[in-house]
Image (cartoon, rainbow, N blue to C red):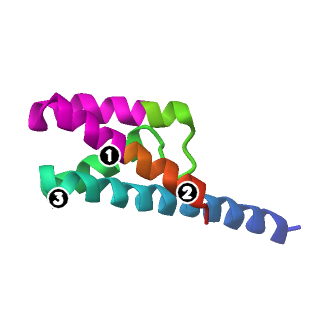
Amino acid sequence: PLVAPDIAVQWALGCRLCAARQAMALADKIAAVLAPQLGTYSADAVARHICAKYAIDEDAGAEKLQQLRDFLRRGLVAYVGAELADSLASQCVHLATESREEGP
């Protein structure tokens, strides 16, 4: 009887860790797209913040990816201009959909 709850807790923690790794992998990809414009540290901070704030990982659905795109685009406009902001946001969403299609 004591083993079952422990296994359930371990499984739940494993799922959370797996989701966190997926979010970090996507954040790393997004940061790589943003780094040439924002610098490595800023790009990494932005990518991790957005993925955490909107709970976006490699399994994110279309609605969450649209939120990601809109948030990125609006935030980047002041730094890179409207046209490049739109392009960078689209590239980041494209990476997320590519990751989802590739699967594990």
Residue 87 on image: x %, y %: 27, 39
Residue 94 on image: x %, y %: 43, 46
- Return the mark for residue 49: 1
- Return the mark for residue 41: 3
- Return the mark for residue 19: 2
Query: Is residue 53 positioned above or below 34 on the image?
Result: above
Pick whichever of labels 2 and 1 is earlier in the sequence. Answer: 2
Depth check: give the residue in front, 14 or 23. 23
Pick whichever of labels 1 and 3 is earlier in the sequence. Answer: 3
- Structural distance between the alpha carbons of marks 2 and 1: 15 Å
**Secondary structure at numbered mark 3:** helix
- Structural distance between the alpha carbons of marks 2 and 3: 23 Å
Q: As shown in the figure, which amino acid type bears the numbered disc 1?
A: His
Q: Residue furthest right?
A: 1
Query: Is residue 9 positioned above or below 30 on the image?
Result: below
- Structural distance between the alpha carbons of marks 1 and 3: 12 Å
Q: Is residue 21 magenta?
A: no
Q: As shown in the figure, which amino acid type bears the numbered disc 3?
A: Tyr
**What residue is shown at x 34% (from left), y 46% (from top)?**
91
Query: In the rendered structure, which segment of residues is drawn in magenta?
Result: 67-91
Residue 79 on image: x %, y %: 10, 37
**What residue is shown at x 25% (from left), y 47% (from top)?**
46
